[in-house]
Image (cartoon, rainbow, N blue to C red):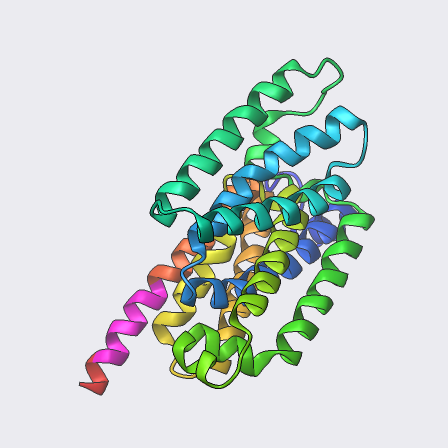
Amino acid sequence: MGDAVSFPELLALPFLQRALLAGALTGALGGVLGSFAVLRQLSFFSDALGHSALLGISLGVALGLNPTLVLIPFAVLFALLVNHLVERSQLPTDALLNIIYSSSLAIAVVALSLLPGYQGGLQQLLFGDILGVDGLDLLLVTLLLLGVGTYLWATRSSQILLSLDESLALSRGVEAQRQRLLFVVVLAVVVAVSIKAVGVLLISAFVVIPACAARLVSRHFGGYVLLAAALGSGGAVVGVLASAFLNLPSGPCVVIVQLLGFLLALAAGRRLQGRAA
């Protein structure tokens, strides 16, 4: 595409404009929620949600409904079930989540292969198709970003305390279990809405990489969250543009750009530590 179309012509393409906007919004969402999820050690939880999303998609295809609209309630119920199992099981959390996400992924792949009316590509579901987002997808992501921002701002004191020191949060009267459950539900909805653009296998990278990069160079919580959102959003925009010019898969390109951002943050973080010492 890059050899035949100039940069202004490329930016004038409606599908690319939608992809850039979707990438910016989805990247910001992933960065904001990831900044809290990383501190609460919920990174693997988001990975399990992403893999299980394929099971929700197969359910939507089987029912003949919009997979995204089916995926939202499915992801919320799945997240609540997983959270219940994690709290009640005596098994290590990472082992339990590994069992859940690998088995749900296997069931979903088999179910999709058995659906006679299924015309979609498995690779598209696994790695996303941000160039294929439509107006409804953009509306959902925009509303979700506004909703998540409002929720986090309204509960910012509780969220910060729970992320930094749960014992201190409990001593200050924070309802830790209720807030944790609400956060898990919000995380599940974000994963469900982002799957079409990002894909099942790459959704955890959207949540984890920008947050980890921001953590390396941030010294204040507010700056950490904003930087994670900026890195997630900026990485998505650059990745989509690079994929359009080079005619490469969009989702993996975005993750590679985010990885480069993480490596730069790693180098910058070491320099900052060296100066502080």
- The residue sitting at 43% across, 50% down in the picture is 44
Q: Is residue 114 visible?
A: yes
- Examine the residues drawn in magenta and state their main secondary structure: helix
Relative depth, front residue between 88 and 128: 88
In the image, residue 50 lies in the stretch drawn in magenta: no
53 over 154 or under it: above or below: above
Q: In which quarter of the image is the N terminus?
A: top right
Residue for point 38% across, 61% down = 262
Residue 173 x, y percent position in the rendering: 52, 83
Give 191 or 24, whichever is nearer the viewer: 191
Residue 226, located in which quarter of the rendered image?
Answer: bottom right
Q: In this view, does 244 lie to the left or right of 220?
A: right
- Residue at left 72%, top 57%? 141
Image spot of residue 28 (x, y percent): 59, 64
Vertical placement of 66 versus 111: above or below? Answer: below
Give the residue drawn at x 72%, y 20%: 118
Q: Tell whether 201 sits left or right of 136.
A: left
Q: Position of residue 15 (x, y in %)?
A: 75, 45
Query: Which region of the structure is painted magenta?
Result: 264-273
